[in-house]
Image (cartoon, rainbow, N blue to C red):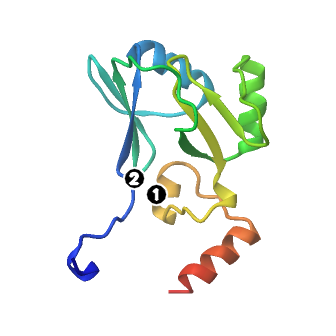
Amino acid sequence: MDDAAKPRLVGFNHVALEVGDIDAALDFYGGIFAFTLRGRGRNSAFIDLGDQFLALSAGRTQGPDAARHLGLVVDDKGRARRHLERLGVELLPGDGVEFRDPWGNRIQLVDYQNIQFSKVPAVLAAMGLGELRKNEAAEREIQEKFGSG
């Protein structure tokens, strides 16, 4: 099939994580991150990420994730690492900041300033992150890949 006839992937609306218990998951993630809920049901909760969301769904039955993981973007990865350490959350080996939640979901934290992923200024402002900026290397990568327009 001709690529022009195929739909294009644009991005993520949400990612769903299976957890054992919604209240326990909200307590766990709420102990680590500041967030607001977009919605809540008996067996689900939706953590607001501005123009995206993280869906938590009760009912995880599989074992811990090995290589499969979710990369969450944070405003300050170093601060996140220090906070996880203070909370006693076990960090996985390596140079990054990775951990497993109590249900075995592997979470990798990525610093917003270092990556090409960008939120438009209006979304950042609405999230209270209007001052968040990219570092020079990320800005250069964005410019090289996407140009000025």
Q: How far apart are marks 1 and 2 (CA)?
A: 7 Å
Left or right, residue 98 beside residue 63:
right
Q: Which of marks 1 and 2 is in front?
A: 2
Name the outermost residue toward the bottom. Answer: 148
First in sequence, mark 1 or 2: give its number. 2
Badge 2 marks a residue whose secondary structure is loop
Badge 1 marks a residue whose secondary structure is helix
Residue 92: percent from the left, percent from the top?
Answer: 71, 29
Residue position for label 2: 51
Tell whether label 2 touches label 1 (CB within 8 Å).
yes
Which numbered dot is residue 70?
A: none
Image quarter for residue 48? top left
Residue position for label 1: 123
Residue for point 69% across, 77% down: 140
Return the residue nearer the eye: 10 or 78: 10
Judge whether 74 appears above or below 33 on screen. below
Residue for point 59% across, 57% down: 130
Left or right, residue 17 beside residue 101:
left
